[in-house]
Image: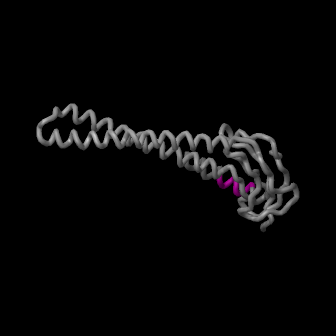
Amino acid sequence: MGNFKGVFLLLLLLSLTFAGELKVYSIVKGRVTKVHVKEGEKVSKGQLLIEIDPSLYLAEKERLLGKKKEIEARLWKVGRDYERLRELFERDLLAETVFENKKVEYDTLMAQLQQVEGEIKRVDTLISYTRIVAPFDGRVVRILTPEGSYTNGELQPQPVLILRSLGK
């Protein structure tokens, strides 16, 4: 499988070198709110080309931040209870199973918190992908998603425009 990826990348680079054109893809879904370029226009590497409405991802981030706060509050309470039970257990005033159950509850909440934090990072990454920039200096050949159109890039990467390389 690793060789296949290498061959594909090599073919992509050769295709780019010979054809000089590259489709620029969106990997997020949403409405195209602004196209900053026109067909035939020269662009520089890193230049903002297209903006996609990040509302879906911002709403998901808010939901996840709320979930994170809830888990943190529960974790604080379970952590305090765990410390109290640990002291009782160390003085032989508490059954081991009660102490272990609280430890499992604490560890489970820690794992949930870690999962939510990972989901927040994922959503932050998707938000950053709502601003599509030029991967190299080039010229816009064709705009495939005009303002007001929708991309469904998360389901399947969707080409948004075609660039022709100016170099070499």
User: In which quadrant is the N terminus drawn?
Assistant: top right
Residue 58's quadrant in the figure?
top right
Q: How is the image coloured?
A: one colour
Q: Residue at x 75, y 60 (%)?
A: 17
Residue 149's quadrant in the figure?
top right
What's the magenta region? 9-15
Task: Tally the marks.
Answer: 0
Q: Residue at x 83, y 60 (%)?
A: 139
Q: Can residue 120 be seen in this view?
A: yes
* Relative depth, front residue between 41 and 163: 41
Determine whether, in the image, residue 134 is placed left or right of residue 6: right
Residue 124: give x, y in percent of width and height: 58, 49
Q: Is residue 19 visible?
A: no
Determine the main secondary structure of the stretch shown in magenta.
helix
Residue 72 sits above or below residue 101 on the image: below
Residue 40: give x, y in percent of width and height: 88, 58
Residue 82's quadrant in the figure?
top left
Q: Is residue 17 magenta?
A: no
